[in-house]
Amino acid sequence: MRSRIERKHVSFKLALAVACLCLSALSTFAADAPSRVMIKPEVSRSHREELIKRLRVITGWRNLTFDSNGALRLGDIPTTGGSESARLLLIEAVAGPNVIVLEDASARTDVAFCRVVRGRWVRDQLNMPPAYVVLIDFKDFQQLSGDAEARAAFDVGWGLLHELDHVVKDSDDARDAKTVGECEDHINRMRLEVGLPVRVDYFFSRAYLKADANFNARYVRLSFARQTKRYWLVWDATTVGGLHSDDQRALVR
């Protein structure tokens, strides 16, 4: 199976997204506590706070934050609960060999929830570490409705962890409906560690809900489970995106 990280050349815009952080990233690497996970300065304060809040809940790190240079800092306050597997993944991402840049991709039609692509340094590429850009569509997560347990198990924090797992673990997504894939197996372990239902499907399916005939809505759903009980998320795929020619096999990024 192949990794879901896109191996094709990224656009100049994405290459520039990494290059613009070159100087600040390098200065961060030289600090006493280096971090290779960076957030772009263009990401709004509200979106940063939302991401920080979700990651704190998942990991139990109460003072996890982004510093003034945009570097992800895990903090030093003892944890209160949280997922040990999620903490280990973030430690590997922060201290690993790859530069990971977080970019706000809200309302982009080519991003459904989150997506990770390869980045390129504009200058001195041979001497720079491998770079990846995690595209986060914060607005997509605001389109979700459904059971509270499912919404807690599929927010922007979980979306970022999914993409980080691809980079850090080189894990694969599902290629058919029989499994959720290696990556989501890892994320499901984290959900279990914090008492949340696990994701049952990687591909979303059509939700046959009645829509206003004046709107071109196409509702889809994704299932989660705790023991024998099912929980559902529902959203309009024409707004969020991710539809392929066969909407029954569309990917949830």
Image (tube, rainbow, N blue to C red):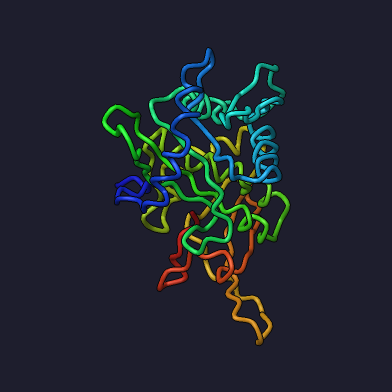
Q: Quadrant of residue 26?
A: top left
- Looking at the image, the residue that sits furthest to the top is 32
Question: What residue appears at the point 61 percent right and 45 percent down from the top-left corner?
Answer: 43
- Looking at the image, the residue that sits furthest to the left is 126
Residue 215 seen by the camera:
yes
- Give the tally of numbered discs: 0
Left or right, 57 with reference to 178: right
Q: Name the foreground residue: 109 vs 3.
A: 109
Q: Quadrant of residue 167?
A: top left
Question: What residue appears at the point 46 percent right and 39 percent down from the top-left corner?
Answer: 20
Question: What residue appears at the point 64 percent right and 82 percent down from the top-left corner?
Answer: 215
Question: What residue appears at the point 66 percent right and 16 percent down from the top-left corner?
Answer: 76
Is the residue 214 above or below the residue 87 in the image? below
Is the residue 132 above or below the residue 234 in the image? above
Left or right, 31 with reference to 77: left
Q: Name the foreground residue: 177 vs 219.
A: 219
- Image coords of residue 160 (percent x, y): 54, 42
Q: Name the foreground residue: 47 vs 113.
A: 47
- Image coords of residue 14 (percent x, y): 42, 49
Residue 227 seen by the camera:
no
